[in-house]
Image (tube, rainbow, N blue to C red):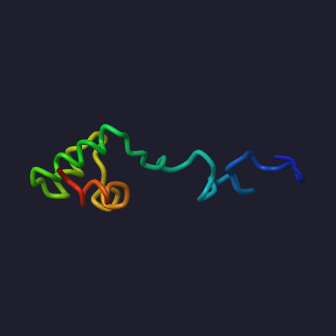
Amino acid sequence: MAKNAKPPKGLTKAGKPRKNAPGQGRPPYKPSEQSRVQVTQLAGIGFTQEEIAAFIDPPCDLKTLLKYYRRELDTGL
């Protein structure tokens, strides 16, 4: 690399990936309408939160379930 040349996007001057480089890491979780309905129904029939997190598609961590589906868990039919 030339002396004054900029490193490629997402890399440090040493050529290592930046910690917060664009395009790296897991994409954010996006709940679907179908999964919201599933969570409401499963909570209503008595599934535990851990079981619901493992059952929905795509499966998620318990923290993610609580973050994105709080209303559905509270109002389960």
Residue at x 24% of width, y 48% of height: 39
Q: Is residue 76 left or right of residue 30?
A: left
Q: Residue at x 88, y 53 (%)?
A: 3
Left or right: residue 18 versus residue 60 is: right
Q: Is residue 72 left or right of residue 23?
A: left
Outermost residue toward the top in this view: 34
Locate residue 76 relative to residue 18 in the image: left or right.
Answer: left
Residue 49 placement (x, y as % from top left): 19, 58
- What count of labels does the image hold? 0
Q: Position of residue 5 (x, y in %)?
A: 86, 49
When the figure is inspected, residue 27 is found, relative to residue 73, above or below; the finding is above
Q: Residue furthest left?
A: 46
- In-front residue for pair 14/54: 54
The residue at the far right in this view is 4
Out of 41 and 4, give the one closest to the viewer: 41
Image quadrant assignment for residue 37 = top left
Please provide percent x and percent y for residue 56.
Answer: 25, 43
What residue do we see at 23% from left, 49% from top? 40
Q: Nearer the viewer, residue 11 or 30?
A: 30
| Image spot of residue 4 (x, y percent) | 89, 53
Above or below, 22 against 48 in this view is above
